[in-house]
Image (cartoon, rainbow, N blue to C red):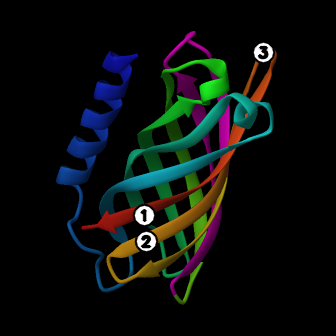
Amino acid sequence: MKKIFTLVLATVIVFTVNAQDKKESSGKGFSFGVGPSLAFPMGNFGKVYSFGYGAELQATYHASESFEGFAQVGYNNFSIKSSFGSGSIGFIPVLVGGRYVSSGFSVGAGIGYGSFTKGGGGGFAYSPQIGYSFGSVQVLAHYSGVSATGGSNSFIGLKAFYNF
C-alpha cells in the first residue's frame, strides 16, 4: 500500500510541476495544494474509532471561472477508543471530482478508492464537499464514506489547502 501511495504522490507532483504555476488571465490553469485534515468518525466506525487527523495533497484544474476539477490523495490516522484497546488505523483516500465555484464558495464531490491500513480493507470512496477560498487558502467541509463488502465506514471532516 505504501508503494501505491508513493506512486500516486509522485504522479501528482510531476503532473503539477509540469503544469502552469498560476492560473492564466482567462481563469484556466493548474494549481497544487497541500494541507492538514481533521476527521470525526460516524456510525459504527465512530463507535470504535475517535478523532482522526492527517494531511492531503490536491491538484486542481481551473477549467473556467465557475468550474474546477480536482484530484486529492492523503492519509488520515484514527485512534482506537480506549474501551476497545489501544492503537490506530490509517485511511488513504484517492479521489477525483469536480466543483462549482462562485465568489470564493465551492460545492462539489469526489469519487475514488479508500483503503484502510489494517486489515487491508477498502473500497469505493465518495466525498461531497463544500468550501470557501481565502486567496491561496481553501477550506473544505466534507462527508466521506467508503463502501466495501460487509458495510461502510464514514466520517465528517475539515480540510485546508494552501494552493500555489
Which residue is rendered at x = 72% and y = 32% of the image?
A: 45
The kind of residue tagged 2 is: Gln
The residue at which mark 1 appears reads as 160
Q: In the image, 76: left or right of 149? A: left
Q: Which mark is residue 111?
A: none
Instruction: Identify the residue shown where x is 31% and y is 66%.
Output: 162
Viewer-nearest residue: 107 or 30: 107
Callout 2 environment at 10 Å: few (<14), some (14 to 19), or many (20+)? many
Q: Depth check: 13 or 56 in front?
A: 56
Q: Could you tell which of marks 3 and 1 lies nearer the N-terminus? A: 3
Q: Quadrant of the N terminus?
A: top left
Q: Which residues are magenta?
A: 104-127
Residues at marks 3 and 1 touching, judged by CB atoms closer than 8 Å: no
The answer to which of 128 and 47 lies nearer the viewer is 47
Q: Please report the residue visible at 48 percent of the width from the left and 21 percent of the height from the top.
A: 87
Along the line of sight, which residue is nearer the eye, 110 or 40?
40
* Of the image marks 2 and 1, the number of the one nearer the N terminus: 2
Mark 2 → mark 1, Cα distance in angstroms: 6 Å
Residue beneath disc 2: 138
